[in-house]
């Protein structure tokens, strides 16, 4: 998530809603899942 924020903000600043959503995701269990481990079965749990 951190890398996404850094790279995205180099292109365009994030709005409050998107920043809050990304922060909420990164603070939940979903933020601990590596992108390579993200599958539809993992997200359905």
Image: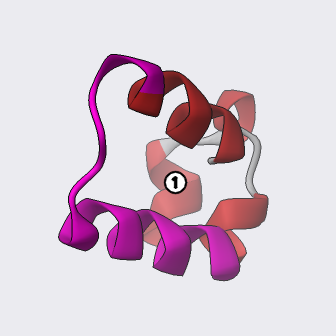
User: Could you tell whether 33 is left or right of 22 in the image?
Assistant: right
Highlighted magenta segment, given as a residue range: 10-28
Secondary structure mostly taken by the magenta-highlighted segment of the chain:
helix
Residue at the (59%, 33%) spot, across then down:
6
Q: Is residue 20 above or below residue 39?
A: below
Residue at the (64%, 82%) spot, across then down:
28
Tag 1 residue? 41
Q: Can residue 45 be seen? A: no
Q: Give residue 30's position: percent from left, percent from top.
A: 62, 67
Q: Is residue 39 above or below residue 17?
A: above
Q: Give residue 18's position: percent from left, percent from top.
A: 27, 61
Counting labels gives: 1
Crowd band around label 1 with a 10 angstrom C-alpha radius: few (<14), some (14–19), many (20+):
few
Residue at the (25%, 70%) spot, across then down:
16
Instruction: List the single residue furthest toward the top.
Output: 11
Residue at the (27%, 28%) spot, across then down:
12
Q: Can residue 24 be seen? A: yes
User: Could you tell whether 6 is left or right of 34 in the image?
Assistant: left
The quarter holding residue 42 reads: bottom right
Is residue 24 highlighted in magenta? yes
Location of the C terminus by quadrant is bottom right
The foreground one among 41 and 14 is: 14
């Amino acid at each position: 998530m951190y890398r996404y924020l850094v790279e995205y903000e180099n292109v365009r600043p994030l709005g409050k809603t998107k920043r809050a959503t990304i922060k909420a995701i990164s603070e939940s269990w979903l933020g601990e899942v590596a992108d390579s481990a993200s599958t539809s079965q993992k997200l359905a749990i």
